[in-house]
Amino acid sequence: MELAFVGQILGLYKMVLLVRIILTWIPHNPNNSAAIFLYKITEPILEPVRRIIPSIGGIDISPILVFFGLGLLQRAFG
């Protein structure tokens, strides 16, 4: 029962991360409260990955790596 809940939380976090990824592709106001919220809840996971895996050709791939990593965890717990 608890493992399924962890899987659901991971799925929700993946959706939030996906919204952040999409947000980087479109012009937006970075001072928007929703954007600030997205950055505050995703940056603690993305920043350590960014330190380990640098940008490739100026493209930050940390969100993609975290997204796939969360998918693996979700399958393990879900």
Image (cartoon, helix red, strand yellow):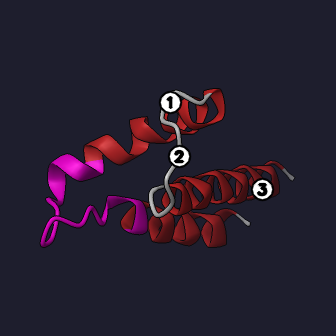
Amino acid type, residue under disc 2 in the picture:
His
Q: Relative to 74, does residue 29 appear above or below in the rendering?
A: above
- Could you tell me residue 76's position as x and y percent? 62, 69
Q: Residue at x 28, y 52 (%)?
A: 49
Question: Residue at label 2?
Answer: 28
Q: Is residue 18 left or right of residue 53?
A: right
Q: CA distance from mark 1 to mark 3?
A: 20 Å
Q: Residue at x 41, y 38 (%)?
A: 43
Which region of the structure is painted magenta? 49-64
Question: Residue at label 1?
Answer: 40
Secondary structure category for the residue under label 2: loop
- Could you tell me residue 45's position as x and y percent? 41, 43
Q: Nearer the viewer, mark 1 or mark 3?
A: 1
Q: Nearer the viewer, mark 3 or mark 2?
A: 2
Q: Residue at x 74, y 66 (%)?
A: 78
Q: Is residue 77 magenta?
A: no
Disc with the residue nearer the chain's start (2 vs 1) = 2
Q: Is residue 62 magenta?
A: yes
Q: Relative to 4, does residue 33 appear above or below in the rendering?
A: above
Q: CA distance from mark 3 to mark 2?
A: 29 Å
Q: Nearer the viewer, mark 2 or mark 1?
A: 2
Q: Is residue 70 left or right of residue 75?
A: left
Disc with the residue nearer the chain's start (3 vs 2) = 3
Task: Indicate the quadrant where residue 11 lies.
Answer: bottom right
Task: Indicate the quadrant where residue 57 lies.
Answer: bottom left
- Could you tell me residue 2's position as x and y percent? 80, 48
Q: Badge 2: how crowded within 10 Å, few (<14), some, or many (20+)? A: few
Amino acid type, residue under disc 1 in the picture:
Lys
Q: Badge 3: how crowded within 10 Å, few (<14), some, or many (20+)? A: some
Question: Residue at label 3?
Answer: 8
Q: Is residue 2 left or right of residue 64?
A: right
Q: Nearer the viewer, residue 33 or 54?
A: 33
